[in-house]
Amino acid sequence: MEPLLKVENLKTVFGPVVAVNDVSFELRKGETLGLVGESGSGKSVTAFSIIRLVQEPGEIVSGRIHFQGRDLLALSEEEMRRVRGAGIGFVFQEPMAALNPVMKVGAHIAEALLVHGLASRADARGRAIELLRAVKIVDPERRVDDYPHQLSGGMRQRVMMAIALACRPPLVIADEPTTALDVTVQAQILDLLREMKRAFDLSLLLITHDFGVIAETADRVAVMYRGQIVEQGPVRDILRNPQHPYTRGLLDSIPGGEPGTRLRGVSI
Amino acid sequence: MPLVEVCNLVKHFERGGGLFREKTIVRAVDDVSFSVDEGETFALVGESGSGKSTTGRCMLRLIEPTSGEVTFRGENVLGFSSARMRAARRDMQMVFQDPYSSLNPRMRARTIVEEPLVIHDIGSKAERRDRVADLFRLVGLDPAHLERYPHEFSGGQRQRIGLARALALNPSFIIADEPVSALDVSIQAQVINLLMDLQQQLKLTYLFIAHDLRLVRHISSRTAVMYLGKIVEMGPTADIFANPQHAYTRALLSAVPALDPDAPRTRIELDPALVNREAPLRQISEGHFAAI
């Protein structure tokens, strides 16, 4: 079966710095692929390259990104705008930076629906409330009129999910969706991601630095290091039998063995 | 004998209070008591707003507590004059979370590490120069980089500079407030190893403030769990993890993602309404207490 997303030999540079270097991977329908790495590994730039929102002076110099039978890198900006939201939803790490502080929660969701012509002004509000209910926000009829600052971090991330899901995209890219959250809130958001995946029939590209998040959510994993994918495979294989020295080092860096012993860490 | 004892520590912040609004009192630290033994690592864990950092700051009087006692080597430091407190701080130091904002960007690494020696008027210029180079080596930095500025170092190296500065006055007690949480996981491992090595080598006592439960389990001998300004459970770290008693501790531990994809996922949700905030700590087993 044709994969939903197929990235081939992607290369993204920032001037002389090669942030993403010859990266290739596939995401099958219904699958969660975890893209894991440390800061500067190129995992976020890979995600932003897919939706063609790489910040200046970053530039995609080569590669192909097949999504639903089209090469995204060959689309016009107009066509690409339709893909963002309707084809690929996005959840960012910092919801406060992604949400407009002077726009009510409902208006964010309504905007997504209106831009893509998926609701009339008259029923946008009702649809927004439905979506807030879907992401388990208590009392959605009242929350729809809240401003972002009135919400807790976990609730803001739920709103981000509702916006990402508004146009029913088949693929959602989530970039460190739980990194800024407390561990108990993170657990709730991870549970929600899994539930939404089922309810909305989603495929998920999950960008994270946290192998715990990977273990809980991903079917397959790609490990990035200095702009390249150094290892990829089913989550069990990678966690139990890592082959690349960097993957091994990363897993050995996580405290979990005999208390008080030295952590082995990365040694490449 | 405990090196540090905290008794009934309270810190209230007043919030709001305007023409038409009543002041509200936030009980950031609400009657907290614990003690840290010489040579051990005692962990204070909790989520944001639990009061763990405020507790640490009150202990060194970086902020003044509302009431309570903090005893260091048998003396109540909350009763110290400011001059006396300055002297006492030679022996109790703090390492901060963010290596990016806790170092003065306009100072060279040498000056940052030397500053405590200058403030406390220790050694001649030449002696201080040697001491700073020694401290650099002690934390695994190259003395050839002493003239560099903070931005020329990586995050992990900056945290090492912060540590060198904290160690300059030969303290016996260090409060480390989330010392590795801003670092990448491979760098975290290096800094954790360094902290464990230094503890052995210099006979340090640590109060470790952290939200990362895997880390706490790895490095601390005893742990106190804070929730909304109170310690809800405290005891030997192994007991807390193997046999958590308080509903919040159980919820917290169950929220940590397992590294095994096949591990059974038993999420325990906390119903805040069912937590009796007034329950006193009672002994569960030797040294293990829970507010249930």
Image (spheres, rainbow, N blue to C red):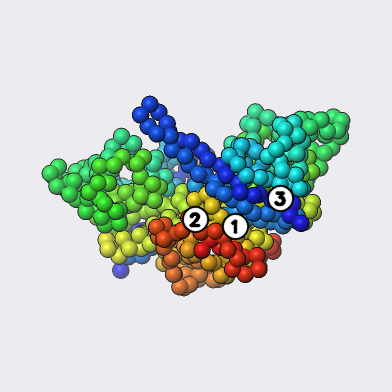
Amino acid beneath label 2 = Glu
Identify the mark nearer the N-term, 2 or 3. 3
Percent x, y of residue B146: 74, 36
Percent x, y of residue B170: 79, 43
Amino acid beneath label 1 = Ala
Q: Which chain carries label 1?
A: B
Q: Which chain carries label 3?
A: B
Percent x, y of residue A161: 32, 52
Closer to us: A47 or B204: B204
Query: What's the residue at 48%, 36% (across, down)?
Result: B14
Amino acid beneath label 3 = Val
The tag on residue B224 is 1
How far apart marks 2 and 3 lie (CA) works out to: 25 Å
The tag on residue B278 is 2
Q: Mark 3 points at which residue?
A: B4
Query: What's the residue at 57%, 70% (across, down)?
Result: B242
Could you say which quadrant of the image residue A268 lies in? Answer: bottom right
